[in-house]
Image (cartoon, grey):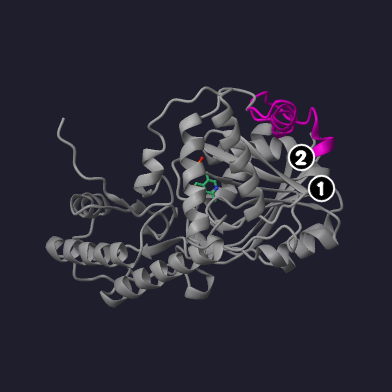
Amino acid sequence: MATRPDPILLTPGPLTTALGVKQRMLHDWGSRDTDFIGMTADVVRQINDIAGGGDTHACVPMQGSGTFVVEAMIGTLVPRNGHVLVCVNGEYGRRIVKICDILGRRRSTVETPEDQPTTADMVHDALAADGSITHVVLVHCETSTGILNPLEEIAKVVSSQGRSLLVDAMSSFAALPIDARKVRFDALVAASGKCLESVPGMGFAVVRKEALEPCAGNSHSLSLDLHDQHQYYLKTKQWRFTPPVQVVAALHEALRLFNDAGGQAARYRRYRDNCDALVRGLTRIGLVPFLKQGLQAPIIVTFHAPSDAKYDFNAFYGKVRERGYTLYPGKLTQVETFRVGCIGAIGAAEIQAAVDAMAATLKEMGVTQLAPARPDPGSRSRAAAPASSRNR
Ligand SMILES: Cc1ncc(COP(=O)(O)O)c(C=O)c1O
């Protein structure tokens, strides 16, 4: 079968990985092989180190995509009579609300428009108003827009109010600084196929040991139980159920590359440069970013769709893909947008070439009105909806 070269994935995962990461998967390992057990031990130790976890925290790996470990975190850390405050300003916050509902955990929300961060003041007021709230769940970088929520400020408020913080750091971990010695959280989750630049297939939670210890029996689920997974690992150094051996091997190599390249600070700089080059390049041709730049995490950028009648996302996507670049659709319900990721094993050259491919494609399609349609004052987007707080 003839194969095309892999596209450059400008998406928030799966993303473009280094050749060495792919090559590390070309082996078979048994789950009890000492080599494999050693790789798992290295991976969990290094992830805990990246989070500044030290002896107070432990990294618990979990099979599956990112949502599996988000669900495992909530099901394990929140007791069945707990009450969760979910900070919502996008799709992944809404997914956490859904998880709480399905797991039968009582929940309330603080909601902000999709172009505005949750603020520490809002969380403070919600906690002060309701002493029954036990946990706050925050999405650090809300990948549905790329907005960054102020983790450190919110963590201070949650801690000063004596509640627990759970963080979905899926698209920020290892790129943005998160240090458990400075930011108090009970659990933080992310996954292999995001800013660590490996393949998808496993998530992990960095959990404060003191918070995890009393969680036996909280989980609604056999497989998504972080407490049980951790206990089994402590006893055997093995995964409880079939481990994704090739995914662990790839992540092991991705972590080596991450450390060799200078760790989180270096990764942040590369993504920042990618993001700046992307925004500069697409703004120059007339496209308009959805977020104010001060709110933008250097992970994924949302752009308004051009107002030109000749623009059609699927056609644009297909033609840019033919040129070798994979874009990402928008995830906003009421404003037409598309997204371009800045993460993965890519740098300035790939970003510049992608900008050129998008510019050439729009030209070929005859799209000349690149600015977004002016908002209809009667139908404000969800992005402009008022901030609110809801209880269920
Ligand atoms: C912030 C955030 N949370 C959760 C997820 C869910 O991950 P998955 O689609 O891998 O289940 C993602 C995926 O991109 C994400 O960006």
Q: Which quadrant: the N terminus? A: top left
Residue drawn at (17%, 65%) of the image: 360
The numbered disc on residue 320 is: none
Residue annotated with mark 1: 134
Residue drawn at (55%, 61%) of the image: 264
Marks 1/2 in contact by CB < 8 Å: the verdict is yes
> Please, what secondary structure does the residue beneath circle 2 have?
loop
Residue 66 percent coordinates (x, y): 54, 41
Instruction: Look at label 1 and name its amino acid.
Output: Thr
Residue 39 percent coordinates (x, y): 56, 37
**Crowd tier of the residue under label 2, counting other residues whose Cα lies within 10 Å: few below 14, some 14–19, many 20 or above:** many
Question: Would the CB of label 2 be found within 8 Å of ligand 1?
Answer: no
Residue annotated with mark 2: 78
Instruction: Look at label 2 and name its amino acid.
Output: Val
Q: Is residue 192 magenta?
A: no
Residue 28 percent coordinates (x, y): 44, 25
Residue drawn at (80%, 35%) of the image: 215
Earlier residue among tags 1 and 2? 2
Q: Magenta residues, as a range?
A: 212-238
Q: Nearer the viewer, residue 212 or 156?
A: 212
Whether residue 343 sits left or right of residue 180 in the image: it is: left
Q: Nearer the viewer, residue 266 or 27?
A: 27
Does the image show residue 248? Answer: yes
Whether residue 6 sits left or right of residue 11 in the image: it is: left
Whether residue 160 sits left or right of residue 8 in the image: it is: right
Which of the 4 quarters of the picture holds residue 340?
bottom left
Residue 235 percent coordinates (x, y): 75, 27
Q: Which quadrant: the C terminus? A: top right
Q: Compute the Cα span from label 1 to label 2.
A: 8 Å
Does the image show residue 337? Answer: no
Q: Is residue 232 magenta?
A: yes
Q: Nearer the viewer, residue 26 or 187?
A: 26
